[in-house]
């Protein structure tokens, strides 16, 4: 749980963020997103397929720029930074984990994790030392020399997490990190994320996984590119919804189902946290 008494700048602040893709008329994917994430938060982003979750994460992760609006990362206004400055900020402050791992096939576990430190300019020896430590944290110290094709799915994702955290970023972003894993491996990955958060890392995770989302203290729901609910917010976005797909349907392939509130009985519904704006 974060301490708000001293009010450090939020890790993340989005102010009327809009994302459009070119077209005639332009295709608006995100509409006026306002969002604040404080240091140490653990946030799940949920919503139907196509609602804009990955688009939002790529803006937060500085992989893409908004069409309009303002994004502040660790107090830095991204609109005021050059691409080069943004790349440096990203390398220092953000770790990414994706559903498909994106490990480099020709490299060992150790080397894959050490690539997360290339920007630091440290010696190979030092980078490998830190990579070993990160791999120990994810329980893979015994697989240093394996290549990705010699690892299980859950192990691959733990390598990807070690690579994301080896540089000690303040913010870990994960897009469906358990999406390609079986239940047991997925649970291991979730426990790892919770553990990293307990050590102080701010974590934002996109997930279709209802159980995963339910284990997070804050959930933000997107629908058609808008924030439909935010459990940290008692105001306009305070009403958490559940979707049909939350009850086990595969909604990744079909049209977005209508949200169906389930008052009083939702396992998701928890008291909103205090002290966040
Ligand atoms: N480069 C692009 N050009 C045009 N439209 C795009 C582009 N990238 C994404 N979109 C559209 O933006 C919408 C949101 O996509 P996004 O990937 O953010 O959805 P999502 O919520 O992550 O969905 P899923 O759960 O299926 O991963 C989709 O309708 C998609 O077709
Ligand atoms: Mg997505």
Image: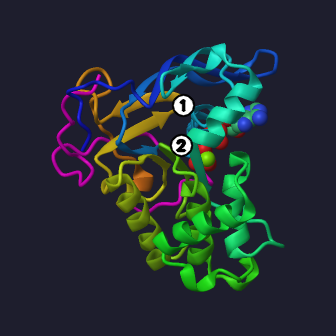
Image quadrant where one finds the C terminus: top left
Residue 265 magenta-drawn?
A: yes
Relative horizontal placement of residue 137, taking residue 162 as reference (left or right): left
| Residue matched to label 1 | 224
**Residue in the image at 45% along x and 54% along y:** 245
Report the colour scheme.
Answer: rainbow
Between the residue at mark 2 and the residue at mark 1, the CA separation in whole angstroms equals 9 Å
Mark in front: 2 vs 1: 1
x and y percent of residue 199 in the render? 35, 54
CB within 8 Å, label 2 to label 1: yes
x and y percent of residue 162 in the render? 56, 64
Q: Earlier in the sequence, mark 2 or mark 1?
A: 1
Instruction: Please determine whether, in this image, residue 211 is positioned above or below residue 142.
Output: above
Q: 186 or 22: nearer the eye?
A: 186
Determine the secondary structure under disc 2: loop
**Residue in the image at 30% along x and 21% along y:** 236
Decide whether the magenta segment is chiefly helix, strand or loop: loop
Instruction: Please determine whether, in this image, residue 152 is positioned above or below residue 56.
Output: below
Is the residue marked 2 within 8 Å of ligand 1, measured from its CB?
Answer: no
Determine the secondary structure under disc 1: loop
**Residue in the image at 39% along x and 27% along y:** 10
Q: Which mark is residue 101?
A: none
| Residue matched to label 2 | 256
**Residue in the image at 43% along x and 73% along y:** 188
Q: Residues within 10 Å of mark 2 (few under 14, many from 20)?
A: some
Residue 139 magenta-drawn?
A: no
Q: Residues within 10 Å of mark 1 (few under 14, many from 20)?
A: some
In this picture, which residue range is highlighted in magenta?
A: 248-277
């Amino acid at each position: 749980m974060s301490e708000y008494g001293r009010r450090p700048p939020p890790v993340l602040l989005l102010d009327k963020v809009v994302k459009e893709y070119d077209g005639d008329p332009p295709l608006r994917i995100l509409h006026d997103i306002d969002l604040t994430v404080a240091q140490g938060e653990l946030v799940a982003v949920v919503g139907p397929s196509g609602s804009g979750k990955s688009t939002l994460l790529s803006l937060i992760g500085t992989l893409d720029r908004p069409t309009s609006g303002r994004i502040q990362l660790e107090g830095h206004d991204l609109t005021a930074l050059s691409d080069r400055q943004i790349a440096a900020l990203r390398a220092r402050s953000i770790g990414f984990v994706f559903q498909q791992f994106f490990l480099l096939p020709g490299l060992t576990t150790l080397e894959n994790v050490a690539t997360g430190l290339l920007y630091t300019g440290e010696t190979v020896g030092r980078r490998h030392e830190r990579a070993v430590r990160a791999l120990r944290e994810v329980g893979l110290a015994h697989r240093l020399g394996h290549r990705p094709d010699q690892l299980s799915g859950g192990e691959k994702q733990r390598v990807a997490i070690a690579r994301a955290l080896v540089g000690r970023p303040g913010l870990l972003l994960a897009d469906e990190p358990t999406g390609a894993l079986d239940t047991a491996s997925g649970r291991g990955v979730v426990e790892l994320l919770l553990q990293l958060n307990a050590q102080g890392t701010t974590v934002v995770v996109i997930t279709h996984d209802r159980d995963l989302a339910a284990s997070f203290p804050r959930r933000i729901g997107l629908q058609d590119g808008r924030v439909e609910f935010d459990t940290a917010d008692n105001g306009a976005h305070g009403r958490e919804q559940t979707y049909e797909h939350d009850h086990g349907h595969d909604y990744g392939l079909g049209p977005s189902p209508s949200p169906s509130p389930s008052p009083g009985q939702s396992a998701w519904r928890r008291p909103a946290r205090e002290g966040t704006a």
